[in-house]
Image (spheres, rainbow, N blue to C red):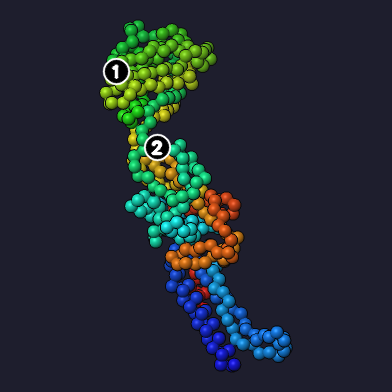
């Protein structure tokens, strides 16, 4: 009896050393969580009860408990490295099976999916055609194809016309600066994404009265469009110019280019002509140049045409009992009856942590404590 009791102690000590050795071995493993061996004493029992003087029968290993405390966050130069600050797990699809991990070292595979080092696909919320985050959970995908161009449909202009100007004496001629008072330009786009230069010309005709002329690529002129101002410098009538350029005049193979120029925010004060804002809604085709994540896990892609849009949102899972999760290797876990079902949602909600981009969570192993 004494021999078997002593053997149980040796086995328990060996189990403890195995756990400690595993902790030390993984002290540099991203996302690793330290484990602790839990033991219990053994007593002989029978249906008839046991005496108060019963000697113990040794010790047994009851549980290897994982401690899910926060590890240190280390910053990296990889925009796909993600760390969770707070509670939660990344959701990984391993050939359709759900796994959970704190390890955030991700990459893009040759198919464009965001994967971990073992090839599991990071799960997140998808985006609609309009770029809005949906409630659909799936593989996060980085689309590297060109985004379609968008034809200009509106141009908005905020400017001031100098009330001190005098009307030109000659008829308007876009090639002769003496025939107009002021001019400005911006770029507009046809439906194929080709850029064109819109030029606006302002000609004073009388006190508080102006004409607006326009050309596209120096071609046929549109207008004039009459604008009148009140005595306080605000627009009384006019200020919107509708412009159509025929496909043949564009010379790019695109269809007719039609858009409105909204100048209703224009003022006429006794100060120099100035344009404070000019915005148009068209753009050319764009190639992906970079993307990054914000703390809510939304991935924003940036393109060569100056556009940016959401391409997905990282999903996080939390559990009622983290210690009930079953480790399966590669710093991944699967849910069990003890852990409860995964509660998947957006970072920063329902007790879930937030995302830190270009960073990874280090193992929460204290080497000194393990050695002691």
Q: Contact (CB < 8 A) between labels 1 and 2?
A: no
- 371 sits to left or right of 338: left
Residue at the spot 50% in from the left edge and 75% down from the top edge: 19
Which of these two is toward me, 270 or 348?
A: 348
Asked if residue 80 is positioned above or below residue 258 in the image, the reply reads below
Residue at the spot 46% in from the left edge and 52% down from the top edge: 123
Mark carried by residue 357: none
Extreme left residue here? Answer: 251
Q: Is residue 302 visible?
A: yes
- Looking at marks 1 and 2 on the same chain, the residue that comes earlier in the sequence is marked by 1
Q: Is residue 297 visible?
A: no
Mark carried by residue 307: 2
**Quadrant the N terminus occupies:** bottom right
Asked if residue 264 is positioned above or below residue 370 in the image, the reply reads above
Mark carried by residue 219: 1
- 256 sits to left or right of 209: left
Residue at the spot 49% in from the left edge and 13% down from the top edge: 237
Question: Which element carries disc 1, helix, strand or loop?
Answer: loop
For disc 1, the neighbor class at 10 Å (few under 14, some 14 to 19, many from 20) is some
For residue 62, which quarter of the picture? bottom right
For disc 2, the neighbor class at 10 Å (few under 14, some 14 to 19, many from 20) is some
**Residue 274: % across, % down:** 42, 22
Quote the CA–CA distance across marks 1 and 2. 29 Å
**Residue 134: % across, % down:** 50, 43
Which of these two is toward me, 351 or 180?
A: 351
Asked if residue 235 is positioned above or below residue 367 in the image, the reply reads above
Residue at the spot 59% in from the left edge and 78% down from the top edge: 39
**Residue 202: % across, % down:** 39, 15
Question: Which element carries disc 2, helix, strand or loop?
Answer: loop
């Amino acid at each position: 009896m004494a021999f078997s009791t002593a053997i149980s102690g040796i086995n328990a000590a060996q189990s403890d050393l195995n756990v400690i050795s595993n902790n030390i071995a993984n002290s540099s493993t991203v996302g690793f969580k330290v484990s602790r061996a839990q033991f219990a004493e053994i007593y002989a029992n029978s249906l008839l009860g046991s005496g108060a003087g019963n000697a113990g029968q040794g010790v047994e290993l009851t549980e290897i408990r994982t401690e899910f405390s926060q590890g240190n966050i280390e910053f990296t130069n990889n925009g796909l490295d993600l760390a969770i600050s707070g509670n939660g797990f990344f959701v990984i699809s391993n050939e359709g099976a759900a796994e959970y991990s704190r390890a955030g070292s991700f990459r893009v595979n040759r198919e464009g999916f965001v994967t971990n080092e073992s090839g599991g696909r990071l799960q997140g919320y998808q985006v609609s055609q309009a770029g809005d985050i949906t409630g659909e959970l799936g593989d996060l995908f980085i689309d590297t194809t060109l985004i379609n161009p968008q034809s200009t449909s509106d141009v908005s202009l905020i400017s001031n016309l100098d009330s001190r100007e005098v009307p030109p004496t000659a008829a308007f001629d876009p090639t002769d600066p003496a025939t107009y008072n002021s001019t400005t330009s911006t770029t507009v786009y046809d439906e194929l994404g080709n850029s064109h230069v819109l030029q606006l010309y302002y000609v004073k005709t009388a006190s508080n009265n102006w004409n607006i002329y326009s050309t596209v690529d120096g071609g046929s002129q549109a207008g004039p469009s009459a604008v009148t101002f009140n005595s306080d410098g605000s627009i009384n009538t006019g200020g919107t110019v509708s412009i159509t350029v025929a496909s043949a005049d564009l010379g790019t193979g695109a269809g007719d280019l039609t858009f409105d120029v909204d100048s209703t925010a224009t003022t006429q004060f006794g100060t120099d002509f100035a344009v404070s804002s000019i915005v148009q809604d068209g753009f050319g085709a764009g190639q992906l140049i970079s993307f990054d994540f914000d703390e809510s896990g939304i991935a924003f892609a940036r393109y060569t045409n100056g556009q940016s849009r959401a391409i997905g949102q990282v999903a996080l899972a939390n559990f009622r009992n983290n210690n009930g999760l079953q480790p399966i290797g590669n710093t991944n876990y699967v849910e069990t009856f003890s852990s409860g079902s995964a509660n998947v949602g957006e970072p920063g909600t329902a007790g879930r942590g937030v995302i830190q981009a270009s960073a990874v969570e280090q193992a929460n192993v204290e080497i000194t404590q393990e050695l002691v």
